[in-house]
Image (cartoon, rainbow, N blue to C red):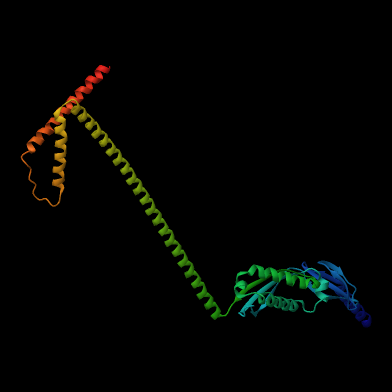
Amino acid sequence: MVFESLTFVALIAFAFILITTAVKSVPQGYGWTVERWGKYQRTLNPGLHFIVPIMDRIGHKQNLMEQVLDIPPQEVISSDNAQVQTDAVCFYQILEPVKASYEVNDLVRAMQNLVMTNIRAVLGSMELDEMLSNRDRINSDLLNKVDDATDPWGVKVTRVEIRDISPPRDLVDSMARQMKAEREKRAQILEAEGEREAAITVAEGQKQSKILEAEGELEAAKREAEARERLAEAEAKATESVSTAIASGDSRAINYFVAQKYVDALGQLAASSNNKVMMIPLEASSVIGSIAGISEIAKDVGSATVHHGTGTA
């Protein structure tokens, strides 16, 4: 009786173990491989599954979600022999659990070494200035190379990001001095260009001022020429009037010319800087009388013009 009870308990325990080993619940975002007698049989997707106890077992449990892989910092030598320290991060996703399980041993370690090797290859082919200013191109080149290399492993690399590129301290100080010199150079160039623009503006202003001054002098000369022309016309009319009077036998016209010459001579004497005292001869009274007769000649000429105009009308 006791033996039968123990046998019944053993059968129940064995059945429980078989059921436990036969029923598998795969969580969301994972893929499990099933091996039968050590050989890959199939892949279990998320959900409830049954396997053959004893014959089948779970080989690898792969995470199918996107994962982050930290890349250890390393020193890289650029093409111009500058030594820098780099730090990166890689994002990847397992698409084929079978390849990730059986095509590579220790997937995480393999990917770390692969990314580090490609970082040295890509950055080592660049100069330091190019390395610091082309972060996007570096990330793109690394992504293409690493993604192609991990494709046989059933892995899709989504991103490779360089987090930091740190040159040595002495190199950073040298770059800072170089940047300062470049800024000072640009400032001097801008200052020189400003002075040149100012000089050009001043020269243009002076040029415009001289042009306006020349135009003003030209206009003044034209006005002066017109005034002289009008004066000459007036003198010609006066001479014509006097000549007419002389032709008619008026002796006052002759006195007019003599008086005019006399007055001109007195004016030149008065304007001379060498003469401090000027003696006027007694005959000046006759000159004044001759000048007084000029108005009478002008009146006679004017009245003759009026009569001539009336007769014509």
Q: Measuring 37% from the left and 49% from the top, which residue is drawn there?
A: 211
Position of 307 relative to 32 (above/below) = above
Q: Measuring 39% from the left and 53% from the top, which residue is drawn there?
A: 207
Position of 281 relative to 307 (above/below) = below
Position of 86 relative to 289 (above/below) = below
Question: Where does residue 180 sit, x and y in percent of width and height?
Answer: 49, 72
**Quarter of the figure that contains the N terminus:** bottom right
Relative depth, front residue between 99 and 86: 86
Picture quarter containing residue 243?
A: top left
Question: Where does residue 290 sit, x and y in percent of width and height?
Answer: 12, 33
Relative depth, front residue between 32 and 26: 32
- 17 lies left or right of 171: right
Q: Measuring 9% from the left and 33% from the top, which residue is drawn there?
A: 289
Q: Which residue is outermost to the bottom?
A: 3
- 98 lies left or right of 235: right
Position of 292 relative to 27 (above/below) = above
